[in-house]
Amino acid sequence: MMRFVILAALVVLTACQPAPPRAVRSGQAEAVVVRGAPPPSRVGADTCGIAQSGITVGMTREQVMDVEILGPVRVVRPGDVVTLDFLENRLNIGMDDMDRVVRLTCG
């Protein structure tokens, strides 16, 4: 009887595990689909207006503060904890330790 209870518990606990990422083949290329990740067609798209923002890599924090940005913005510095949510119209500004822009992405 005890073996049955242990076996049943293992089956239930195994069912609660998250599904591993699955590989999706499209032609020759292979992409890994992960839950919570943006759809592959949106990655790299300028959906947040990077080109129109006037912000460029190398700008200082003070220069960025002078730019008027319409829409959501997230500034990420080294060591910052960020959520994995994807908002296609949000401008993410990656800064380095010297408060200079090193990366601009949407999401």
Image (cartoon, helix red, strand yellow):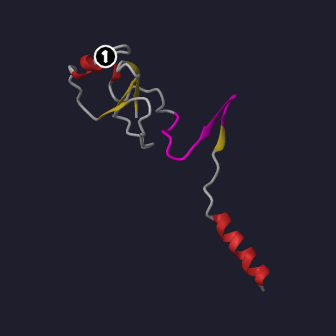
Considering only vertical position in the picture, is 9 above or below 17?
Answer: below
Residue placed most toward the observer, 28 or 79: 79
Quarter location, residue 86 = top left
Classify 10 Å Cα crowding around label 1: few (below 14), some (14-19), many (20 and above): some
Q: Tell which of 53 and 2 is nearer to you.
A: 2
- Residue at the spot 48% in from the left edge and 31% down from the top edge: 43
**Vertical side of 22 occupied by 65: above or below:** above
Specify whether 54 is left or right of 45: left
Task: Name which residue lies at 50% across and 41% down.
Answer: 37
Quarter of the image for residue 90 reads top left
Residue located beneath label 1 in the image: 60
Task: Say left or right for 56 vs 5.
Answer: left
Residue placed furthest toward the top: 58
**Quadrant holding the N terminus:** bottom right
Image location (x, y in percent) of residue 49: 32, 25
The segment highlighted magenta reads: 25-40
Q: What's the residue at 50%, 38% (across, down)?
A: 39
